[in-house]
Image (tube, rainbow, N blue to C red):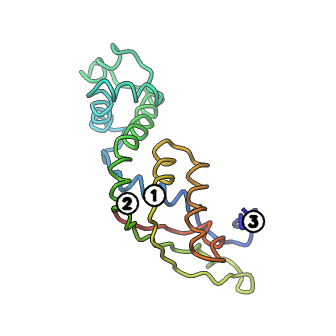
Amino acid sequence: MPQKNIDFGKFGARGIKGSDAVARKLDELAGGIATPVTVRRGWIARLHYLTRTDHARTAARNAGLTVTDRTLKAWLEGKRAPSKANLERIDAAYRVVRRQNVARHLLKRLNREGRGTRVEIHPLDQSQVPRPLQRVVEYRSLNVRRWDRIVGAWATGDHQGLEAAWDDTIVDLGSQWGQYEYVTNVGFAA
């Protein structure tokens, strides 16, 4: 797409990719276990979530948690504790499985039977950019009616797909949509 920023931040602008902000907001809406994985209560809760059904166990294995059933049992009974690397695998597997489990419900809430959800886009931070080089960008909002590609890419962890889906969505902002490739925040509720 012609509006892609090649050298973002060269003059001091700050922000994150809009698709990353959307992923962050979807993670927030998906909710989950608040206790950090580094605390015993946190990793035990994640393990219970990942091992409560055969489907969850299979999804956890596919997500990278490839320890034996014996090891899982020892962890759950408190006889052993996972290593730092295994804690990271537990947390990553939990996030993947959680996304897969809530994606369908979240998609239904965001699409709202075709009415869509209002999205607020906060522009990038130009406070460190010299005055003559600043662009005029303002807070914008739009109603996103089709969330299927966005939520689908988020649920599978497809960053490029999410970026492409988000770029196709913000084209609805008009001729200046490229100015919103990087933002400080994207907000919506479901």
* Proximity of marks 2 and 3: CB atoms separated by less than 8 Å: no
Seen in the picture, residue 54 relative to 107 is either above or below; the reply is: above
Frontmost residue, 170 versus 87: 170
Q: Amino acid at mark 3?
A: Pro
What is the secondary structure assignment of the residue under circle 3? loop
Circle on res. 28: none
Q: Earlier in the sequence, mark 1 or mark 2?
A: 2
What is the secondary structure assignment of the residue under circle 2? helix
**Residue picked out by circle 3:** 2
What is the secondary structure assignment of the residue under circle 1? loop
The residues tagged by marks 3 and 1 sit, at their Cα atoms, a distance apart of 24 Å
Q: Earlier in the sequence, mark 3 or mark 1?
A: 3
Frontmost residue, 64 versus 145: 145
Q: Amino acid at mark 1?
A: Trp
**Residue picked out by circle 1:** 147
Count residues near mark 1 (Cα–Cα under 10 Å), then give few for <14, some for 14-19, many for 20+: many
Q: Is residue 148 left or right of residue 7?
A: left
